[in-house]
Image (cartoon, coloured by chain):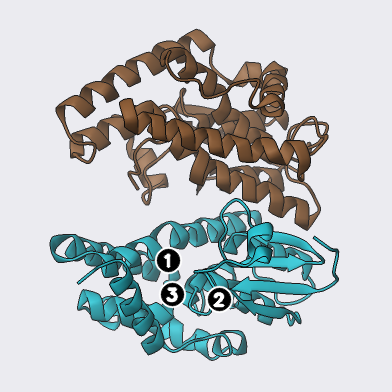
Chain colours: A cyan, B brown
Amino acid sequence: MASEKGVTLLDFWVSPFGQRARIALAEKGVHYEYKEQNLAEKSDLLLKSNPVYKKIPVLIHDGKPVCESLIIVQYIDEVWSDKSPLLPSDPYQKAQARFWADFVDKKVFDCGTRLWKLKGEEQEAAKKEMIEILQLLEAQLGDKKYFGGDTFGYVDVAFIPFNNWFYSYETLGNFSIEAVAPTLVEWVERCKERESVAKTIYDPKKVYEFVGYLQKKFGVA
Amino acid sequence: MERSPSSLKLFGSWASSYTHRVQLAMKLKNIQFEYIEEDLANKSEALLQFNPIYKKVPVLVHNDRPIAESVIILQYVDEVWSDRPVLPTDPYERSVARFWCHFADDKLGPAVGAVFASSGEVQKAAVDQVHENLALIERELREGFFKGKKFFGGESIGLLDIVLGCGSYWLAVFDEVMTDVKLVDPEALPLFHAWLREFEALDEVKETIPAVDKLLEYAKAVRQMLLGMSNNATADSPTATASASATAPVPDITVDS
């Protein structure tokens, strides 16, 4: 890959993982080129930049690719360390932040996928699990302004993109997130007041349409 | 920096490669700590209290505050005890190390676990997966980011060596237990094989990893049990998953979180 100076983000509009990178870059005020990827026909650049997983997001900084959204966010935090730190400086708080961001990674997307991919009892089980996950996260938030405390941080970046999917989860699972995790919904509204979140957000109804397209594609009712 | 053993405890399991990762890092950094062996079939109240989310080992408890997940523990230890660092200082190098650690736990580990828990056609497919995954690592050693390096960490072992190494010595154990399977072919993976031999030759590694005959005995017993279970029950049945996760060597063959 040519050593071009600058920052490029290979991404796909609806990806919550991609949005993490967009939010982190915005928090740091980094100028970058956004390149929307066609995941049905992956570009040479994507395949060369992420040969192992062939997935987005990929951050390319001065020609060097960084893959995996949380690794990208940590990279952004470490390179542009002069502004808006995302990870706490205290090692124990840092470990806790990593743990909960990893928890979001392990749990939210997979459970959400089962919510739209499955029917009947299995879907019901996925819904129960999603409620548990959201309540665990709500308990972790407690009465703090953000997961990071007074400042918007790593876990907030990791989790806030999934709020675009809440409408889909609620509609498919037939439950209300506000009813089961009200302080989480308040946290979402606070995050949406931040420019970095507001300008990278996308319409939950469009996400729902996209989920519908995925359901047809996978032959779900 | 406080180093009294009682303020630093590690809950682990003697055969768990995730536990070995932390023990190895502690040894490299010469950190004193209290080790608590957990019976994974009968988890202690303390473990369940310190890791209520996943209920797994290893868990590090420092001044009564728990840290769970081995790669998170390793980074915590590296930040608190900064002698003999295991992470590089350059952000790009750190991102590469983290990426391959993620790959090891996300892809390679589960594939190896699948080989160990299955037989016949299913096992053959899992073996192919392992070979593909190891080939990717071989490529990085041959022509990618780790080209020309003795260890992934450079001249001495770092985060990725610890993460990959502590799982990889099991590959030879499994190859011995399952005689019709060959996970590491030195001819197909010369650089990976060479790296693994260098890793296993290190004093700190020899002092951390249990003796091969103990591992073999353990692996043979688990393999028997897993094969017995797959004959009697579906892989998803509660007893299957409970037993497998309780006694599985590395990685966790079932996802019990």
**Residue placed furthest toward the top:** B213
Which residue in the protein does label 2 denote?
A19
Q: Are marks 2 and 1 on the same chain?
A: yes
Image location (x, y in percent) of residue A171: 25, 81
On residue A162, the disc is 3
Report the amino acid beneath label 1. Gln
Q: Tell me which chain the residue with mark 3 is part of.
A: A
- Residue type, label 3: Phe
Q: Secondary structure at mark 3?
A: helix
Q: Measured from the top left, where is residue A121 in percent x and y?
A: 13, 61
Q: Earlier in the sequence, mark 3 or mark 2?
A: 2
What is the secondary structure assignment of the residue under circle 2? helix
Mark 1 or mark 3: which is in front? 3
Is the residue marked by circle 1 packed among few (<14), some (14-19), or many (20+) residues within 10 Å?
few
Q: On the rendered structure, is B153 left or right of A108?
A: right
Q: Residue at x 45, y 20 (%)?
A: B181
Which image quarter holds the C terminus of chain A? bottom left
Q: Residue at x 36, y 49 (%)?
A: B52
Which one is in front, B94 or A123? A123
Residue A189 lies in quadrant? bottom left
Q: Nearer the viewer, mark 2 or mark 1?
A: 2
Closest to the observer: A159 or A15? A15
Q: In x, y percent, where is residue B113?
A: 41, 33
Where is the N terminus of chain A found, in terms of image quarters? bottom right
Residue B34 in view here: yes
Dot 1 falls on a residue whose secondary structure is: helix
According to the picture, the residue beneath numbered tag 1 turns out to be A140
Q: What's the distance in space between the residues labelled 2 and 1, CA to CA?
A: 22 Å
Mark 1 → mark 3, Cα distance in angstroms: 17 Å
Q: Chain of mark 1?
A: A
